[in-house]
């Protein structure tokens, strides 16, 4: 029997359309391994909601592997060190893995490659990022030309089939029990509202099938929080339980306005392209002028931040979004824009505070998407919204027919009619259990624009 190879799983927890798996199987005996590395990422270690998802996703992946004669080996520690030791232990000739763009994974790949042959495969994007470049061969910084260049390569390659079997090594190395990692919350168990999710490759396919039924109406429906207009595929895509090209091929022929959804799938590729250029994008303003922004700080700002986190701002649409996030680990796309704009511009709190909160609370917390989207909202990104474009959350609530959504997530307001629920204060119908507005819209707008003026000095 030939020497085995290691298959290093990270955010690619699937068997179908898994190029690293396909390459490993062609070589012979394959040892699939996942390393829980909380050291290499540093402050970017997975947040609580992501850890919940990871537990269930790894359990599903191990079951899928065992169904075709393999299994998942679990180890914990610094990934480069753990894999190096595992290669020595098993006599593995090399490590196959899908390419990742998070800076900590690039660091781990380089560290591992000093002593073990590492073969990286493209597989988490619609197309290899180094092939989507400008005419001069440089990476794009603006989405529209990036999308134009990527579109010329679409449709993506056909997804690879799921292997029918994976050759096993003569001897399996030891594996840590998943339960020993304590990824699930216990005291308290704040994840009781996560039950609607089905982590794993099978769950991703169920979600894709459900979305296919209304993908043709995406442009018309995805901004309405009270409907099922979005795909809800984001956590499955983040953990790689389904590939971007599988999603593309799964819905591209739906017709209608599905092209608007495909453009958003491409946005994921774009955000990785940005993080590959700016590894510190989650912590540093891409536009230096924003280093002069006088963000609020101190006890009053801290209290406002807590009110935003807990959904107690007095703006029903904002509070509904923040409570949905805390309860379910996910937030509707339109609400992500509204709540981010509110924190940054109404409360004048540094976008990085919001980015960190989302990182801990989202089951789909993704470094590239999260940081690029927050900098887009702040106006500090290389491709971003203009800061003076300040969302009016009360108008957004009415425009996108959020009454039923607010009733679901802010039960204190459930008895209010549609005419009053978007702005209970203005309607004179605010219940005593619901807070008054933390700040008026006009006052917040004037304060934000004055602060923005400081960036131009």
Image: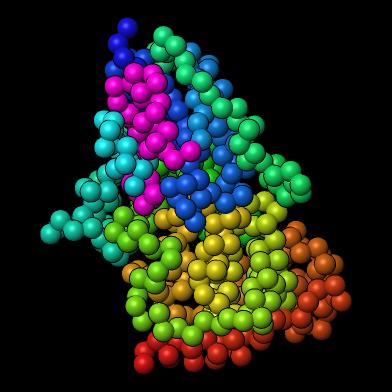
Q: Residue at x 53, y 45 (%)?
A: 235
Q: Position of residue 327 (x, y in %)?
A: 70, 54
Q: Is residue 87 magenta?
A: yes
Q: Which one is in front, 365 or 399?
A: 365
Residue at horizontal 82 percent and vertical 67 percent from the top:
412
Location of residue 178 with respect to 129 vertically, above or below: above
Q: Is residue 13 left or right of residue 308?
A: left
Is residue 216 in view?
A: no
State the residue lying farthest toward the left: 136
On whether residue 190 falls in the magenta region, the answer is: no
Is 70 rendered above or below residue 221? Answer: above
The answer to whether residue 426 is visible is yes
117 relative position to 190: left or right: left
Magenta residues, as a range? 77-106
Residue appearing at x 59%, y 44% in the figure: 51
Which quadrant of the view contains residue 108?
top left
Give the quadrant of the N terminus.
Answer: top left
Residue 96, x across and y down, in percent = 33, 29
């Amino acid at each position: 029997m030939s020497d085995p190879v290691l298959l290093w799983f990270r955010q690619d927890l699937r068997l179908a359309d898994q190029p690293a798996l396909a390459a490993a199987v062609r070589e012979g005996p394959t040892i699939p391994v996942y390393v829980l590395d909380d050291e290499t990422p540093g402050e970017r270690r997975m947040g609580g909601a992501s850890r919940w998802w990871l537990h269930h996703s790894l359990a599903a992946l191990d079951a899928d592997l065992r169904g075709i004669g393999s299994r998942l080996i679990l180890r914990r520690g610094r990934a480069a060190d753990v894999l190096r030791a595992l290669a020595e232990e098993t006599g593995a000739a090399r490590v196959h893995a899908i390419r990742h763009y998070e800076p900590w994974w690039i660091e781990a790949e380089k560290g591992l490659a000093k002593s073990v042959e590492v073969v990286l495969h493209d597989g988490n994007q619609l197309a290899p990022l180094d092939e989507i470049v400008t005419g001069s061969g440089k990476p794009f910084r603006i989405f529209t030309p990036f999308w134009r260049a990527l579109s010329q390569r679409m449709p993506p390659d056909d997804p690879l089939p799921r292997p029918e079997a994976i050759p096993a090594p003569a001897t399996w190395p030891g594996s840590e029990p998943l339960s020993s990692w304590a990824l699930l919350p216990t005291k308290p168990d704040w994840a009781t509202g996560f039950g609607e999710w089905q982590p794993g490759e099978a769950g991703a396919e169920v979600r894709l099938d459900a979305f296919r039924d209304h993908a043709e109406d995406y442009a018309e429906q995805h901004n309405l929080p009270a409907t099922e207009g979005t795909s809800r595929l984001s956590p499955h895509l983040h953990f790689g339980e389904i590939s971007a090209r599988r999603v593309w091929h799964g819905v591209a022929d739906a017709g209608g306005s599905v092209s608007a959804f495909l453009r958003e799938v491409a946005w994921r590729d774009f955000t990785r392209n940005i993080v590959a250029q700016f590894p510190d994008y989650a912590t540093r303003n891409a536009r230096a002028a924003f280093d002069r922004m006088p963000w609020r700080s101190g006890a009053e700002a801290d209290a406002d931040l807590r009110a935003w986190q807990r959904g107690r701002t007095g703006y029903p649409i904002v509070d509904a979004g923040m409570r949905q996030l805390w309860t379910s680990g996910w937030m509707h796309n339109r609400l992500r824009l509204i709540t981010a704009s509110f924190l940054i511009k109404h409360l004048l709190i540094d976008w990085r505070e919001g980015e960190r909160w989302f990182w801990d609370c989202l089951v789909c917390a993704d470094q590239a998407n999260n940081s690029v989207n927050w900098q887009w909202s702040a106006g500090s990104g290389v491709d971003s919204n203009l800061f003076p474009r300040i969302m009016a959350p009360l108008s957004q609530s009415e425009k996108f027919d959020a009454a039923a959504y607010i009733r679901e997530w802010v039960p204190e307001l459930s008895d209010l009619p549609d005419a009053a629920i978007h702005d209970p204060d203005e309607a004179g119908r605010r219940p005593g259990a619901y807070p008054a507005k933390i700040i008026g819209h006009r006052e917040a707008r004037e304060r934000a624009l004055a602060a923005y003026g400081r960036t131009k000095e």
